[in-house]
Amino acid sequence: MFNLFKKKKEEVKAPQFLPLKVREVVRETEDTVTLYFEQPEPFLDYKPGQFLTLVMDFEGKEQRRSYSLCTSPFVDPFPGISVKRVPKGKFSNFLNERVFPGKTINVLKPLGNFTTDFHSKNKKHFFLVAAGSGITPIMGILKSVLVNEPNSKVSLLYCSRNEEQIIFKKELGTLVEKNPDRLEVIHNLSQPSDSWKGMKGRLTKESILDFAKKAELDPEFDKEYFACGPEGIMDNVVAVLDELGVLRDKVHRESFYSSAADKAHEDAAHGITGGLLTRDVTVILDGEENAVTVSPDKTILEAGLSQNLNMPYSCQSGLCTACRGKLQSGKVKMDEDAGLSPNEIEAGYVLCCVSHPLTDDVKINIE
């Protein structure tokens, strides 16, 4: 009788995956595909700029990867993600080579703070900077502005390697043709062909400054800024906007990779733990307290998962906030906090996938 009750209890705690059936596969570039999914019932509720976490088994082990939605719920009838192939990437290579219409993929509910609210009365100038696959969430935001805010306009600075690597090249061109007074797209190529007449070379702080200074020419518009791409480019964008005195709550950034979290994982693998000690942490999950022993080479999430706790997670790099919890007591060290806003950090939220206990009284509530 006890075992039956325990089994039912575990079933309630099991993660609620949403099965999405692939409707269409579109080859965007040689190494990038867009997967459009059939709408589930009820319809998938998401915000432009958010991401889906795909859950798949590789070699008998469950693994998860997050991919930004490239679609807009206000424009596109079917939700879609774009996936660029990564060398030796299990997910990206599988999705580029072996996924066809009709395949069902399990996902977690959409998450992410790389978004904003839209209103027909807004009069804004959106400045968007994207590099490579960073265009993916930017597309959803761009299309949502154009359809929801007739008095707003968009300027996009998009960096690619060459002409063949411009993701959504045709769609962007069509959107410019339909919205010539409201949408400007500037392409910057790092390795263009000899016939290329546009911006080229490495995107510098000076180029970003020239782009951002356009905001000063539009005093009648409110401004909002979005940047998605490699850390170096986004750091330069934020630095330039700081120099221009732009308020941080008007600046949004999204990263697909954290060098800080990656280095922390590498250091842990080599036994470099920065003086961390093995400590017991209390994790409150579904209202129940669980004691988790966290060794110096593990994060709180890794330790919890190794003890079979069904803790939520996605990117495991401190970027997506799927593992977010609220610190009830004690202190932790986070390898990366880019996924949290300043207000969230001030309120005591931490990311379990990159957190290590610094005191013996750490208690985290997973909400």
Image (tube, helix red, strand yellow):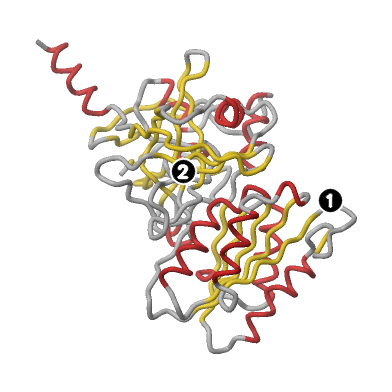
Of 39 and 137, the residue lying toward us: 39
Q: Is residue 247 visible?
A: no
**Residue ID for mark 2:** 351
Residue 169 visible here: yes
In the rendered image of this protein, does residue 15 appear above or below residue 195? above
Rate crowding at label 1 as few (under 14), some (14 to 19) or many (20 or more) other CA atoms within 10 Å.
some
* Residue at x-position 86% and y-position 52%: 193
Rendered image quadrant of residue 4 = top left
Q: How much space separates mark 1 and mark 2, taking CA atoms?
A: 38 Å
Tag shown at residue 191: 1
Please, is residue 122 above or below residue 4 in the view? below
Give the x, y percent position of residue 199.
Answer: 80, 64
Q: Is residue 118 left or right of residue 357?
A: left
Please name which of the two marks, 1 or 2, marks the residue nearer to the observer: 1
Q: Residue at x 21, y 28 (%)?
A: 12
Q: Amino acid at mark 1?
A: Gln
Seen at 65% across and 72% down, the residue is 242
Type of amino acid under label 2? Leu
Q: Find residue 39 and report its horizontal and vertical position in percent.
A: 33, 42
Q: Earlier in the sequence, mark 1 or mark 2?
A: 1
Q: Quarter holding the C terminus?
A: top left
